[in-house]
Amino acid sequence: MTAFQDSQPAIEAPPPDPAAPAPAEPSVTGGPSVTGGPSVTGGPGRRARLAGPAAFAAVAVVMLVVMPLALEPFRLGLLAKYLCYAIVALGIGLAWGKGGMLTLGQGVFFGLGGYAMGMYLKLHDAGGDLPDFMVWSGVEKLPALWGPFGNPAFALAMVVVLPVVMALLLGALVFRQRVRGAYFAILTQALAAALVILLVGQQGLTGGTNGLTNFFDFFGQDLAADSTQRGLYLVVALVLGVLYLAAWQLVRSRFGRLLVAVRDGEDRVRFLGYDPATVKTLTFAISAGMAGIAGALFVPVVGIISPALLGVVPSLELVVAVAVGGRYALAGAVLGAVVMGYAKTYFSEELPEAWLYLQGALFILVMTLAPKGLAGVAAALRHVRTSRRAAA
Amino acid sequence: MEGVLNQLPIGLSIGAVLLLIALGLTFTFGQMGVINMAHGEFIMAGAYTTYLLQGVGFLVALPAAFVVAGLMGLVLEWVLIRRFYGRPLDTLLLTWGVSLILQQLARDLFGAPNVQVLSPEWLRGGIGILPYNRLFIMALAVLSVVAIWAYQHRTAQGRRMRAVMQNRRLAATSGINTGRVDRLTFFIGSGLAGVAGVALTLIGPVGPALGTYYIVDAFLVVVAGGLGRLRGAVLAALGLGLLNSYAEFWTNASLAKVMVFVVIIGFLQLRPQGLFVLRTRALT
Amino acid sequence: MSDNLLEIRGLQVAFDGFRALDGVDLTVGAGELRFLIGPNGAGKTTLIDVITGLTRPTAGSVRFGGQELVGRREHQIVRLGVGRTFQTSVVFEELTVLENLDLAASFRRPLWSLLRSRRGVPETVDKALETTGLTALAGSRAGVLSHGQRQWLEIGMLIAQEPRLLLLDEPVAGMAQDERARTGELLTQVARDHTVIVVEHDMEFLRRYASQVTVLHEGRVLTEGSVEQVRADPRVQEIYLGRAREGAEDAVR
């Protein structure tokens, strides 16, 4: 029964990861001497191997030096927000693009990270009193759940621990039973829906629909100050860079190969002596941890965390951003998040009525015409160029 | 105690609505491997059809909603979905795009605020704890299930549908026009979502986002019921409807969904492929 | 303990009332090359599926090197040293030939050590490349391989895992004549230092490469013996004549 197997390409092979700075295996360019070891990288290989790191370095310089100088604080803040989404997208690229797990509930993990950070900031601002929204909802005593989040170390740990533990638990229960593909997608979506309803309903505990907002101080810095926002931007960009490198190392390692193998032939992997459930659960947890970190950074950057930011729709929007950018390439996922972020801001300011039509039409077009997204288009163009050069 | 009993018709009618929605999903999912996120908007289409036909007669709205929603499904299948067979996850995102467009369309056509459909005179009131409108919804679901069963087992076209569901390639090589069967399945499944939309006008207001409230639960019915299984869908829908309404009753609305989710995950530990499984000997 | 590597006793499998295996007893000694034949539906693949944990038997036991396999998960059975191929070969098309083999060879490494990049090539992989003759293709993506080359890669992946028992499910199905010959050589070579069970339909292949044969029929072991003994058995002639007229001549000659 093939009905609910993953859609990952058995026939159509995704392009090599354009984000990978080096050919992941030295053997591609090598001849028969391949088995000799990793030393086989001839003339053309060296260029390809350096192109990636060079591109990464260039992007890093632009993001860390040029952007903070060129953009006014408001625009820089927007970029910081999109980079937070890009961190989530990176995780989705890993789980979905490389591992074939379509997760429609990354908002859950984003939210766990965001609320953990938000709770700390709220308690810190309140300085021993009750946070403002609790007073308004008639709460008289700080709920026990909130207590430990007054400790910054605890709160920061929870930013990663909560999403990772939740993903490990869900993954272990679901993947072990070989629930996969669309079933997994539906379950993650149901989780996102359930969490939103829970958060909205517990007004006194979570701030309800409004979520947690009105933050003033971030580890001794005034959140309203431009310098703080600039610093936050740099932190977000750095975190994204570091996580990107980590994800890239993961993908090119044996584990990454195993992950792709699980995506393309889970049952076959089992007969190689690996437990695919472990591989998937770990990867899912890593992507959840990334989303949690992103959520925690989002809170001081944007100044709010609320159910509307992490439900079914925002979760799906990020998946679509990854699809638009190109799910098989980590760089595509990151790029997609930034591009879609800008598009959303621009169109919902300029043409608010048309935005939903545009967004809908965009998915249909991308899915129909360029299922590999922008990264796929770029790879195809590059391919045309190189083969033209070869012909000349 | 009275409260507990009052909850019963509510749970059963929610289950009935979920069933009407899930029937279409489970067949399109089981037969074509398609996850149609726009299915919720067919519910909405059925509900707005009822809204437009107010005054013409409620019973006219039923077939009208079936045909309107069914045709929307047929067009969607014909124009887009059939190009995506074998790529269920892509279809999911694709149809979500369609769903966004349809929701915005409804906002532009009917306005963003909810509208109220006046229930017909003969559906107001009730016997004891059983309101007529909820009884009607249950009857509608029962009739639909019987009709689907008869269609699948008693008509040639329905048998073709089952054949394609069980083994598409074999069906195709036996001379069955699978494309036609797919379109028809989509028409019927989407039409039933339209009928569910009619039913929903009896218990609540109609708005552009109507479908989004039910689609996730309906998908859970498919997961719990087993792919493409009528029996499974019936049991899972009733179970989920009752679980939802009692969880809300005993805890509160905000915890209910989390509880339902936990129960589903627990259930999948016992029956990972749902209540009933289409058994085949092939390796995955 | 005898030197029997695999001991199957009273194995039964039922699918919705249909008895795919109906009390199979089978013993395979260490170092043996055993062919498993039988008409369609005899239960050959089901037997392999049970040994490797893909199918749960309704009754019976499968002991491998003294350990019970029934009830273990697929990957655990592989870790005990039982490897298999499938009728339709499944290799990872995205990965290169070398990566496919390396992935197979790495299965005993702790998971965290897989996070490091690969440096060099394990010896077992080198050997598997050599044995299967795929050295020149090591850097190619497995997606571009021909049908025959894929089967060899699969066998290579098995050897790279250094299993104690190899189960090959119809390794030459769909192959051209010269590919069959290559596969036969490969099989002979592999059987030199491994215990191998081969499910095969192809009688020509059987005649050339088999020594010990077990015949399955309707979920039971019909007979066992050398190729000559089995071919001479009137019951074997009967089932092949009764089942499939064409090819039957071939089968018993």
Image (cartoon, coloured by chain):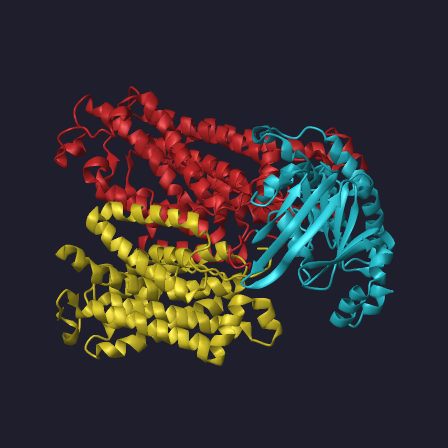
Chain colours: A red, B yellow, C cyan
Q: Can you see residue C127?
A: yes
Judged from this view, the residue extending furthest toward the top is A220
Q: Quadrant of residue A41?
A: top right
Q: In this image, C105 relative to A358: left or right? A: right
Judged from this view, the residue extending furthest toward the front is C1
Q: Can you see residue A316?
A: no
The quadrant of the picture occupied by the N terminus of chain B is bottom left
Q: Quadrant of residue A201?
A: top left
How many marks on residues?
Answer: 0
Q: Quadrant of residue B151?
A: bottom left
Q: Nearer the viewer, residue C116 or C171?
A: C171
Q: In this image, C237 relative to B206: left or right? A: right
* Residue A152 position within the rendered picture, expressed as x and y whole percent measured from the top left: 31, 22
Position of residue A277 relative to residue B90, above or below, is: above
Q: In this image, C215 relative to A317: left or right? A: right
* Residue A194 position within the rendered picture, expressed as x and y whole percent measured from the top left: 31, 47
The residue at 75%/38% (across/down) is C3
Q: Nearer the viewer, residue A61 or A261?
A: A261
The quadrant of the picture occupied by the C terminus of chain B is bottom right
The residue at 69%/33% (across/down) is A47
* Residue C22 position within the rendered picture, expressed as x and y whole percent measured from the top left: 63, 59
Position of residue B158 relative to residue A23, above or below, is: below
Position of residue B172 relative to residue A183, above or below, is: below
* Residue B112 position within the rendered picture, expressed as x and y whole percent measured from the top left: 24, 59
